Amino acid sequence: MMTVTRRRRKQVSEINVVPYIDVMLVLLIIFMVTAPLITQGVKVDLPKASAEPLPPESEPPIVVSVDRDGNFYLSTANNPNVPQTAQVIVQDVNAHLQLSPNRPVVVKGDGAVQYNQVVQLMVLLQKAGVPQVGLMTDSSADGGS
């Protein structure tokens, strides 16, 4: 009689990473779907140091102002002292940026205006295609120290 010898299987000491890859792909898809839902608001480039004035050789900026009552004013309008509607601001700023895309746009807000009004103005400028918005400050004001 012949005896059958069984070979002993060697144990594999490697880690099977396929399930981990599957989990990572599922997490990646979840984050890709939820990330746009989480980010909401107006993008603003904050200065990393003290504010510097615009260079004198640059084009004059488009100044969009908001007063304490929430009225919007546009420096490039026919009469800059007359309040403008949101639609007029979007159209006018968009037209100026099409002629001169590198022209700076700054927001001049009254110190007593509600934050909500400034955010609404920045959203209007975003709709008009403004890539970056500057915030105008009073250079004679104390630095807060």
Image: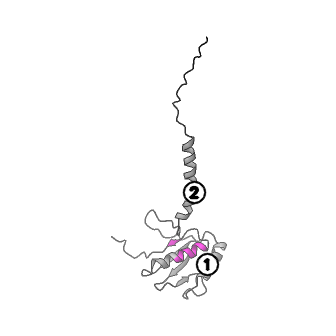
Residue at the spot 48% in from the left edge and 77% down from the top edge: 116
Residue pictured at 58% horizontal, 88% vertical: 79
Asked if the residues shown at circle 1 and circle 2 are in contact, with their CB atoms under 8 angstroms apart, the answer is: no
How packed is label 2: few (under 14 Cα within 10 Å), some, or many (20 or more)? few
Q: Earlier in the sequence, mark 1 or mark 2?
A: 2
Report helix, strand or loop for mark 2. helix
Residue 125 colored in magenta in the image: yes
> In the image, which is nearer the foreground, mark 1 or mark 2?
2
Q: For residue 115, what is the image quadrant?
A: bottom left
Mark 2: which amino acid?
A: Met
Residue type indicated by callout 1: Val
Q: Is residue 130 magenta?
A: yes
Give the crowd class for mark 1: few <14, some 14-19, many >=20 residues within 10 Å. Answer: some
What x and y, as percent, mark residue 16? 55, 37
- Report if residue 87 is visible in the image: yes
Please give the residue where the numbered disc 2 appears in the rendered image: 32
- Magenta region: 120-142
Task: Assign a secondary structure to mark 1.
Answer: helix
Q: Residue furthest front?
A: 1
Question: Label 1: which residue?
Answer: 90
